[in-house]
Image (tube, rainbow, N blue to C red):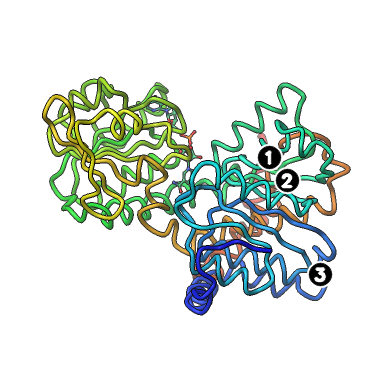
Amino acid sequence: MSQVKDPSLADKGKMSYEWARDHMQILTNTISRLKKSQPLKGLRIGICLHITKETSVLIMGAKELGADVSACAANPLSTQDDIAAFLAENGIHIYAWTGQTPEEYDWCIEQMLSHKPQILTDDGSDSHSKIHGNKKFASLKVLGGTEETTTGVIRLKALAKEKKLKYPVIAVNDAYTKHMFDNRYGTGQSTIDGYLRSMNLLFAGKRVVVAGYGWVGRGVASRCRGMGAKVCVTEVDPIRALEAHMDGFEVAPMSEAAKTGEIFITATGQTGVIRKEHILSMKSGAIMGNVGHFDVEVDAKFLLTESKSVREVRPNLDECVLKNGKSVYLVGKGRIANLVAAEGHPPEVMAQSFSNQLLSMIYIAKNHKKIGRNVITVPDEIDKQIAIDALKAMNVNMDKPTPAQIKYGQSWA
Ligand SMILES: NC(=O)c1ccc[n+]([C@@H]2O[C@H](COP(=O)([O-])OP(=O)(O)OC[C@H]3O[C@@H](n4cnc5c(N)ncnc54)[C@H](O)[C@@H]3O)[C@@H](O)[C@H]2O)c1
């Protein structure tokens, strides 16, 4: 029995699903192409992803290809309740609502796992981690899994390194057609969206500090610059710091950037990036938040429990009056702001990510015995095909190398 916030939102969810579906041509074309052969027939698929309108297109697609799907959210605050209601009405076993307590979040993952998924798709690896760390699920026979995000891939690779990984996993995040586009352009745009919905202040002329210049950080920094902000990047990797410098951004340590920044966005996947000492040195009025996977980048606990007072001044924006008398602001409780304060990535970019997900599920179904207990990347032919499909969907034509060029490219003389 599914559990969602309000089943009466299903009609609204249907409209949202249709809007996303109609802008996810790459994915819907793939689903139509494969529908006849039913490559997921009879398979139980477990999904632990952000329950958004784009995810509903993936879930309904897996169902159309024959799967029995159970689902839960990959974050306690990111579920779109109308979409969850729509999925429940359409035969998906779903356990998701927005505003979950940590206990409810955990319970929902366990409910999803109680359907005994044979293929498990995760974003952040909380469900993969549960299978590996909780005796209750030790007997589950998972054929293989997929993982959507950088942080989840890091956790799975750590398991594989300790030789504890129980089944093969495809690191969907590592496909070119995923991280170069979703992490960069998807998060770039939806971060601006989340911050605007929460604070609705002007970016132009503001000093924005972006922590991390990986795929996400690059996208966020470039979109903030596009909005007219003066962007400063903080990094710990010398090559990425150099790249940010040559891309024309100021680069500084957080201890310096904290004193002058007006808006802060963390995108590192690391813990303790904006700490108490940074927060205390900020200017009154500073706004901070995080778009990395977990809520460990900004010290939200300090802000929310050790401030003189805390009040929600706008949706997803807490004003924290510090003991030093300054007021600073936290977006979305320090959780993934582009999903908590906005709707996550736009459908066109998720069509690429979720085509990778769907084709990886099918690959696992066919090849799980061959892969072994490893984390592998999305096969090259799938990645390239998605790029070709994406170009087609966007009406972009490219050149083909001539036979002479192919020969020249393979010669040494
Ligand atoms: N919000 C979203 O929708 C979304 C989408 C994709 C990925 N993510 C998440 O965002 C995070 C970053 O992903 P990515 O793909 O950019 O990873 P990445 O590995 O490409 O980049 C992370 C960068 O952060 C830097 N870094 C690490 N510690 C730092 C510190 N203390 N200070 C400053 N910089 C530091 C690293 O050197 C690296 O350059 C991950 O948690 C990932 O799961 C979120």
Q: Secondary structure at mark 1?
A: helix
Q: Which numbered disc, 1 or 3, marks the residue closer to the eye?
A: 1
Residue highlighted by disc 2? 145
Residue highlighted by disc 3? 38
Residue 138, labelled with which disc? none
Residue 206 x %, y %:
15, 43
In contact (CB < 8 Å): disc 2 and disc 3: no
How many neighbours does mark 1 have within 10 angstroms: few (below 14), some (14-19), or many (20 or more)? many
How far, Cα to Cα, is label 2 from label 1?
Answer: 8 Å
Q: What's the residue type where badge 3 is placed?
A: Gln
Q: Secondary structure at mark 3?
A: loop
In contact (CB < 8 Å): disc 2 and disc 1: yes
Q: Tell which of 172 and 277 is nearer to you.
A: 277
Residue 66 x %, y %:
79, 68
The N terminus lies in quadrant? bottom right
Tell me which numbered mark, 1 or 3, is placed earlier along the sequence. Answer: 3
The C terminus lies in quadrant? top right
Residue 306 x %, y %:
27, 28
When asked about the image quadrant of residue 106, the answer is top right
Q: What's the residue type where badge 2 is placed?
A: Gly
Residue at 73% in and 46% down: 145
How far, Cα to Cα, is label 2 from label 3?
Answer: 19 Å
Residue at 18% in and 40% down: 230
Residue highlighted by disc 1? 128
Q: Tell which of 381 and 162 is nearer to you.
A: 162
